[in-house]
Image (cartoon, rainbow, N blue to C red):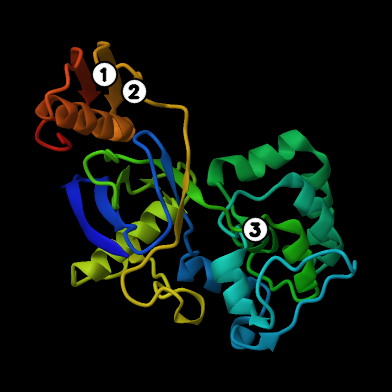
Amino acid sequence: PIAESYELFSARDRNCLHMEVDISGSNLKYETGDHIAIWPTNPGEEVNRFLDILDLSGKQHTVITVKALEPTAKVPFPNPTTYDAILRYHLEICAPVSRQFVSTLAAFAPNDAIKAEMNRLGSDKDYFHEKTGPHYYNIARFLSSVSKGEKWTTIPFSAFIEGLTKLQPRYYSISSSSLVQPKKISITAVVESQQIPGRDDPFRGVATNYLFALKQKQNGDPNPAPFGQTYELTGPRNKYDGIHVPVHVRHSNFKLPSDPGKPVIMIGPGTGVAPFRGFVQERAKLARDGVEVGKTLLFFGCRMPSEDFM
């Protein structure tokens, strides 16, 4: 569960989020300097965009069963399921489209002109980069752009299950000390929203915007959809009912010196300061406990003292 969440600052185009994840009811343990993995869900707008371009909007909740052709292969999500659940919780639908996957889908183009364009995009690296690179197209945005909105009705859904990466966790430096708060993990991160030249809307990070939506819900903010995006916060089959987020811990070699008496200089611009927050907490606790602590200096940067000073 999320114990607490709030914004450290909210500037013109940036929001910095701080969140405390309660791990007391789990088997999770961490050490100062470790990473926390956040398992996000995809935003509803991108799920709907994907369903729409495949002409599946009316079938999003149709129950389907996915079977592997190879007896030894394992389907990478629970069965039976729905189109909506696969896209929302299990596939990396927001990632930039790959040229190899474009080549695979060319055979299913709505007409010969689109097929020719797809074949060129798939075979010509420079042309592909020219047409897609500036826009950060995901697969649904790409298909819509190439076909000018015409539906792609003949692509077998299995092509996406095979061709798209499984939705991956996003890793963040833990910004707390396990010595100070062993049962709570702190996250400090900027909500990713970047205006891309040649693109109508900003490119938005999947996980940080998901966390921001959880923060909005927890605090009862009047606009629960950050930047116009909506998320199914309860997860598949209401698995995360309440203010919960699926996480795990990845251990890191990025640690304070084992000898607390050694001096340390830390440099962290922006939210790069996150792990050092935990280091400072740890050394302050050791000093309070009477341990001889070496000189500890932290240099951090911000854009403007009145805007994003943390």
Point out which mark residue 139 bears. none
Q: Which residue is mark 3?
A: 166
Foreground label between 1 and 3: 1
Q: Position of residue 198 (x, y in %)?
A: 49, 45
Q: Quadrant of residue 165?
A: bottom right
Up-down: is 154 above or below 292? below
Cα separation between marks 1 and 3: 42 Å
- Tell me the SS state at disc 3: loop
Q: Is residue 114 left or right of residue 308?
A: right
Q: Residues within 10 Å of mark 1 (few under 14, many from 20)?
A: some
Q: Is residue 102 left or right of residue 44?
A: right
Cα separation between marks 3 and 2: 34 Å
Q: Position of residue 259 (x, y in %)?
A: 31, 16
Question: Residue type at mark 1?
Answer: Pro
Q: Earlier in the sequence, mark 3 or mark 2?
A: 3
Q: Position of residue 51 (x, y in %)?
A: 61, 75
Give whichever of 93, 118 is nearer the camera.
Answer: 93
Q: Position of residue 44 (x, y in %)?
A: 47, 71
Up-down: is 237 above or below 146? below
Residue at 75% over, 57% down = 163
Q: Which residue is mark 1?
A: 260
- Most distant residue in the right direction: 70
Residue at 19% over, 17% down = 293
Q: Quadrant of residue 285?
A: top left
Q: Is residue 302 visible?
A: no
